[in-house]
Image (spheres, grey):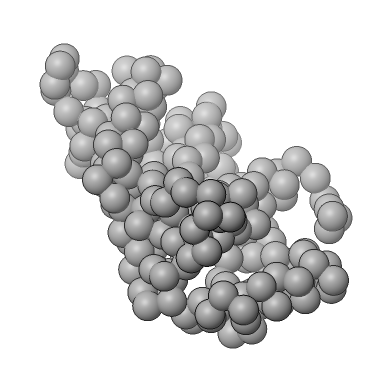
Amino acid sequence: MAKPRLIIVIRHAQSEGNSEKTSPISMPNILTNSTGNEENRDIHQTIPDHRVKLTQEGWAEANDAGRRLRKLLRPDDTIQFFTSPYRRTRETTEGILATLTSDDPEPSSFRRHDIKVYEEPRLREQDFGNFQPCSDEMERMWQERADYGHFFYRIPNGESAADAYDRVSGFNESLWRQFGDDDFPSVCVLVTHGLMSRVFLMKCKTTGNTS
């Protein structure tokens, strides 16, 4: 069995959907989502979540993540990426690979053609519906979710946290089965979203956690 020596979970870099740093109190069109990140509500009212792209700062963060990853790896490591199919996670993966495999400032032990990259839909962000509604409706929905219970409340046209947990659980189980392959890489990198990272870790560490 070729269980990887490292499983590394990376949240996507800064995107246009969470690029604002202004306080929600002074900027009404910025909300704080369930992961604690500030989101630009205007973006999510007009652009599908899966099409939200990285900012210039986000690209710099992705490149920096690649340099940091390079320091964690051994020269003889083999690497496999699983990435959410959303644009911001795919771009984060591109930015990571660019510096991970770059020969600047010194030769890299890793070549792009040797690194497997798979898009994994089960790692996508929790679905909060198609386009986010106006401020008043959004506040009503968050209050209803707080009253009902965050884990089981299903967003209209979207998912509950329980739904997201179920699909990440399915991914975890299929990933564990791959550990039985003799050629499974020594390092597995998941590029996903803030909430999904926590769900993945929750599934790895606990069972039956609905708080």
**Quadrant in which residue 46 is drawn:** bottom left
Asked whether the viewer can see residue 115, the reply is no
The N terminus is located in which quarter? Answer: top right
In-front residue for pair 81/53: 53
- Residue 132 picture location, percent across and down: 51, 77
Extreme residue toward the bottom, this view: 157
In-front residue for pair 18/187: 18
- Residue 87 picture location, percent across and down: 33, 61
- Residue 203 picture location, percent across and down: 72, 49
Q: Is residue 153 left or right of residue 201?
A: right
**Quadrant in which residue 173 is drawn:** bottom right
Asked whether the viewer can see residue 29, the reply is yes
Q: Residue at x 80, y 67 (%)?
A: 146
In-front residue for pair 141/165: 141
- Residue 206 picture location, percent across and down: 80, 45
Q: Is residue 142 left or right of residue 210?
A: left
Q: Residue at x 31, y 52 (%)?
A: 54
In-front residue for pair 176/192: 192
Name above or below for residue 69 compared with residue 135: above
Q: Residue at x 45, y 46 (%)?
A: 21
Q: Residue at x 72, y 47 (%)?
A: 202
Extreme residue toward the front, this view: 26
The C terminus is located in which quarter? Answer: bottom right
Q: Is residue 210 left or right of residue 178?
A: right
Disc tally is: 0
